[in-house]
Amino acid sequence: MNRVELLAPAGNLEKLKIAINYGADAVYGGTSTFSLRIRSGKEFDMDSFKAGIDYAHERGKKVYVTINGFPFNSQLKLYENHIAQMRELSPDAFIVSSPGVIRMARRIAPEIPIHLSTQANVMNAMDAAVYYDMGVRRIIAAREISLKDCEAIKKELPDLELEIFVHGSMCFAYSGRCLISALQTGRVPNRGSCANDCRFPYEIYAHNPETGTTFKLEEETEIGTYIMNAKDMNLASHIDEILSSGVIDSLKIEGRTKSPYYVAVVTRAYRQAIDDYYGGVFEAERYQKELHTTQNRGFTDAYLISRPFERHDTQSHGFTIREGTHQVAALVTEDGTTWRCKDKTCVGDRLEIVLPVGARIEEVDNEYGTVELGEEGKWWLTVKKIVSRSGKEFECIHSGDLNDIILPTRFPGYTILRRDIREARAKKGLDPEPQAIQRREIPDKGNG
């Protein structure tokens, strides 16, 4: 039996390494505006992307390159040059949306497999067969597809690999086919610069053209005006059902522009879910507990298991995003000797230690801190001394401080230190209860 692949987002080199250390079998990312994540594309250059591919390959992992934008005529030569450059880095596949770019990639880099982006909106065996005949070897199905439809495609095309999204942002429009951002801000969603206008609050008015009178329609209490704000997909509780179908080859996590903490925790949770399924000890509550530590817009299991018209819980009308149950306090550096502050931390603080998959640590007690194994198998660090590598000492250190703080012992690289969100809010003098965040955001996200 072939084990399913876990595919995680790589928004930059650090997040690529974190995804691999926290259990990903493969990662996906890109270097340019030809990828439908412009911001993350800018975080990579050719040298750092090559370093990421080399890092992955040295560990037996794969890297898929996103070239899933839709080109203008004026960009065709640029696409050709980009594909040729990427070919030299020896990635494991190209993720492509446009039929023309598929043909271009097969001509320029015939040795690189083609994966069809979710932007192509494949929902049935007929369309899948067309792309398969064009040379596509994997289809990333539309987010709106059902598991039964995946089974039907696999029955018709058993050699075609199927990849599905299992976690991350959902689009208000059908598989990202949205023009609201282009209309309101001039940022084109299907070329990677979506302003996420569906995440904004809106006011609704009724206008009478005969009298010129305009009435504001008042919001019903607690209903909210985030009228297009889709909840985040979360299929962790259905991993057993998905894998039991035997037709899915890759499980994909959305989120190249999300935080290192998100990449680490979500990847680790799905790694555990997959491994537990194959080990016969699947436990949905365990994975959900970790996934709920991340910021989210509310969770939904979307449409893979249930048909769209059966779903009535896919929108968050009252808020755009809410805090998870935990706050990152610090991220350990790659060499494991120091940590860098992500949230105010003081001498005496006790932080939970989140380890990469398969990593080990030992108990220690010295002048810098105490590392101990607590209840429920969780590891904890009690901070006794905050001293930077340069010798500067602090009573408290704040988010954004770039000093590398010495650890009491070497930790696995990219270990995360976190605290309960109520404690984090209390340290800032805020209401300790987690809040839904109602704000106008313009994150640089596309669909792909």
Image (cartoon, rainbow, N blue to C red):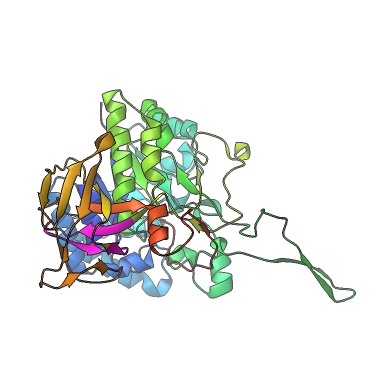
Q: Is residue 64 visible?
A: no
369 on left or right of 330: left
Query: What residue appears at the point 53 percent right and 68 percent down from the top-left corner?
Result: 440
26 on left or right of 296: left
Query: What residue appears at the point 28 percent right and 62 percent down from the top-left corner?
Result: 345
Query: What residue appears at the point 27 percent right and 36 percent down from the top-left corner?
Result: 375
335 is within the stretch colored magenta: yes
Q: Quadrant of the C terminus?
A: bottom left
Number of labels in the image equals 0
- 42 or 352, nearer to the observer: 352
Q: Is residue 77 visible?
A: yes
User: Whole-percent x and y of residue 101?
Assistant: 36, 59
The region drawn magenta spans 328-345
Seen in the picture, residue 427 relative to 151 is either above or below; the reply is below
User: Whole-percent x and y of residue 205?
Assistant: 75, 67
70 is within the stretch colored magenta: no
Query: What residue appears at the point 32 percent right and 63 percent down from the top-left corner?
Result: 343
60 on left or right of 267: left
Q: Looking at this view, name the residue that lies furthest to the top.
A: 280
Q: Quadrant of the N terminus?
A: top left
Q: Looking at this view, name the residue that lies furthest to the right.
A: 211
Query: Quadrant of residue 273 in the image?
Result: top left
User: Whole-percent x and y of residue 87?
Assistant: 20, 60
- 112 or 47, nearer to the observer: 47
Query: Quadrant of residue 243 in the image?
Result: top left
User: Whole-percent x and y of residue 433?
Assistant: 48, 53
- 272 or 436, nearer to the observer: 436
434 on left or right of 375: right
